[in-house]
Image (spheres, grey):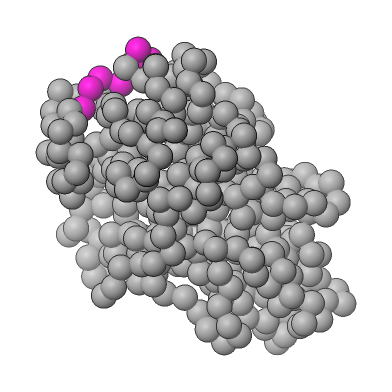
Amino acid sequence: MTYSVAVSGASGYAGGEILRILAAHPDVEIRTVTAHSNAGQPLIQHQPHLRSLSHLTLGDTTPDALAGHDIVFLALPHGQSGQYTDALSDAALVIDAGADHRLTSSADWDRFYGGAFHEPWAYGVPELPVAGGKQRANLVGATRIAAPGCNASTVSLSLAPGVEAGVIDPSDIVTVLAVGPSGAGKSLKTNLLASEILGTANPYAVGGTHRHIPEIRQALAAASPEPAEPSGIRISFTPVIVPMARGILATSSAPIAPGATDDEIRAAWESAYGDETFVQLLPVGEFPRTADVIGANTALLGLAIDRAANRVTVVAAVDNLVKGTAGAAVQSMNLALGLPEDRGLTVNGVAP
């Protein structure tokens, strides 16, 4: 069976990456692409790397334009998806790459985003440990999926195995992320101009203000073997823009739980990801580079046990536009439709 697809926000980075992956997917046909200010223009004008889709023209993003497809991807700015998802009841599968359906707490939504709160959907990170299993089980057969925030899923995948196994204390997490500016979207912003980011590193959203914090706390609380509230997850989260177009390198640490041995700590991550295709734990003493995951739907993790500081440190590398967003969305789509989970996706990056 071939599924018809519509992609909104198709002129942006996330929408373009969804299209790039779907263009090589054997089970879908991209029929409709939409935008806002760029409507009426050829898709190839805004995504010149997508040569196989040069026949497509960007339409207006309206419920009527998106209706009538088997699958709808929404790659819109945060706070804009809800107005469309409410009107897409006829679509068999809707996947939102924005934040509108990620959070379970309306209070967190009000604090970090604001505007209308929409119901949470199945969270699109299949490998994420949750109490009693993996998030994958909640995606099989799902009809509404919230693709993750790229920083949030990177940190959550880094630490959830330790939370689930009880070998780290999630009340004192510290994470610092080097991130590429593509994660901020394609719209023009002065602080993202090349002259502002080349040759420098720029911290932002410092001091607990980043919008992905409640998403991380929510995910790690779900990994706890005992019923836990996100309020029990305390995290110091500092992102830093660095001059690379794509990529996230997240360095996250948490205290070692009392009595946890080195073998038990390492085993927690090995058990969680030993059979996974797209989340891989590197051998002892090895740590990933962003260069190794660019273009791939892969999260690479390196783990260190620092007994002098009594902390576990996990270094994770992902391509923010693939595993961080579009790849996770397509992987979740495959699960929802009963297709092979890796259909249309690759573990191989692009080098140099």
| Of residues 286 and 54, the one drawn nearer to the viewer in this rendering | 54
What's the residue at 50%, 28% (across, down)? 93
Taking the image as shown, residue 324 lies to the left or right of residue 152, namely: left
Magenta stretch: includes residue 27: no
Q: Position of residue 6 (x, y in %)?
A: 35, 28
Location of the N terminus (image quadrant): top left
Question: On screen, 336 above or below 151?
Answer: above
Taking the image as shown, residue 113 lies to the left or right of residue 6, namely: right
Q: Where, by quadrant of the figure, is residue 5 drawn?
A: top left
Would residue 207 be seen by someone viewing this image from the given angle?
no
Location of the C terminus (image quadrant): bottom left
Q: Position of residue 169 (x, y in %)?
A: 76, 65
Q: Where, by quadrant of the figure, is residue 185 drawn?
A: top left
Instruction: Give the residues drawn in magenta, as a range.
Output: 58-64
Taking the image as shown, residue 176 lies to the left or right of residue 55, namely: right
What's the residue at 81%, 81% (across, down)? 261
How many numbered dots are placed on residues in this image? 0
Q: Position of residue 219 (x, y in %)?
A: 66, 48
What's the residue at 49%, 15% (across, down)? 90
| Of residues 61 and 217, the one drawn nearer to the viewer in this rendering | 61
Question: On screen, 325 above or below 2?
Answer: below
Q: Position of residue 114 (x, y in %)?
A: 51, 28
